[in-house]
Amino acid sequence: MIIEPRMRGFICLTSHPDGAAQNVKNQIEYVKSKGAIAGAKKVLVIGASTGFGLASRITSAFGSDAATIGVFFEKAPAEGKPGSPGWYNSAAFEKEAQKAGLYAKSINGDAFSNEIKRETLDLIKADLGQVDLIIYSLASPVRVHPVTGVTHRSVLKPIGETFSNKTVDFHTGKVSDISIEPSKEGDIENTIAVMGGEDWAMWMDALKKEGLLAPGATTVAYSYIGPSLTEAVYRKGTIGRAKDDLEATAFLITDSLKDINGKAYVSVNKALVTQASSAIPVIPLYISLLYKIMKEAGVHEGCIEQMQRLYQDRLFSGKEIPTDEKGRIRVDDLEMREDIQAKVAELWKEATTENLAEIGDLEGYRKDFYNLFGFEVPGVDYSKEANELVAIPSLS
């Protein structure tokens, strides 16, 4: 079938298997071009199909020749109906891993559930014995608690008072003012339940209890801080409370892993175009300005550049892992450089519908958004029929 992008608001309803495959190949080639990483050899990635999770899996496999198990929740294709982008990403990854002689298997289902945890534990036990790196990169808006059965939904809201600022519709380029009402009773608790550290700790506890963690095993979860421009709605809002909980959980997990000399870290990554960030008011405008400035300064990174640097320069450099005063690994260091942030703040005041195309990188934002779904990827002929019925080898 001919597959074209079909939009509903800030969501793309279709994805392209050939574009996704080319995206994955491009990321693999980047990692290989940077040389070998003396990293972990048996890796579990929870949330492995898009964004930082996918980039982590690619970096583990093609940087360190690691065996990888990926857990994700993606929609399989049906005749005439494309699958989700993460489905096609994972299919492409497994095929490339097989070509390279690397072990790669995937589990598709709700990573919050006891059933998917059990299936993952059994696969590790049967095929790998133990894992030495666990990446936790879930980005779901909803969690059904595996113990209580309660459905929790996260919200992105300020706490205490209404937040008003600029935003942009990246489809039209229109800059406008927006107001977001403050959180209501239960919003903070629900957001922490979905995006905090409880599920990460549950995964680590289950792995440890069954002896599936190698001595010295490391686990890393991903977070974001961001600038003062966005802090009212992000870091000081409901999501920020969840990130605080995630970061506190790292210390609890590290304490629980002392007997195997294991460690848990939170890596603070840079702002990037993702399906989630595109729906967050203010963030698209911030990223479009940030991209322009970082590209001009020669320090722009995407997901794969971030993860390759995290692995090579932080996790597996052979030196002590550098952390900030709160124990976090910082690979948002280039984004948060004083000169970069000063320029963003300056341009933020000037940004209008009329000048954004000039002072920001709205086109780069838009291109990255469509790339998430396999569209507008260089080298792909979108006028050709595509086979939507692509299988993930380990799931077929």
Image (cartoon, rainbow, N blue to C red):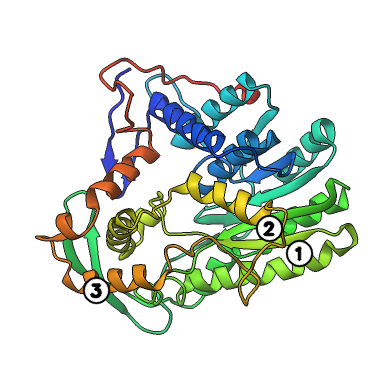
The residue pinned by badge 2 equals 200
Image vertical order of residue 13 relative to residue 394, above or below = below
Q: Nearer the viewer, mark 1 or mark 2?
A: 1
Q: Residue at position x 32%, y 29% from top? A: 378
278 vs 330, left or right, is left
Q: Nearer the viewer, mark 3 or mark 2?
A: 3
Q: Is disc 2 placed on a helix, strand or loop? A: helix
Q: Of callouts 3 and 2, which one flags the residue occurring earlier in the amino acid sequence?
A: 2
Q: Residue at position x 81%, y 34% from top? A: 128
The CA span between labels 1 and 2 is 9 Å
The residue pinned by badge 3 equals 346
Place of residue 132 in the rendered image (x, y in percent of width and height, measured from the top left) = 78, 46
Image vertical order of residue 139 relative to residue 15, above or below = below
Question: Which amino acid type is marked by label 1?
Answer: Ile
Question: Which amino acid type is marked by label 3?
Answer: Glu
Label 1 neighbourhood size at 10 Å, few (<14), some (14-19), many (20+)? many
67 vs 151, left or right, is right
Q: Quadrant of the N terminus?
A: top left
Q: Residue at position x 40%, y 49% from top? A: 275
Q: Do the residues bearing badges 3 and 2 touch, measured as CB atoms within 8 Å?
A: no
- Residue in the foreground of this view, choosing between 290 and 43: 290
Q: Do the residues bearing badges 1 and 2 touch, measured as CB atoms within 8 Å?
A: yes
9 vs 273, left or right, is left
Q: Quadrant of the C terminus?
A: top right
Q: Of callouts 1 and 3, which one flags the residue occurring earlier in the amino acid sequence?
A: 1
Callout count: 3
The residue pinned by badge 1 equals 253
Question: Which amino acid type is marked by label 2?
Answer: Trp
Q: Is disc 3 placed on a helix, strand or loop? A: helix
Q: Of callouts 1 and 2, which one flags the residue occurring earlier in the amino acid sequence?
A: 2
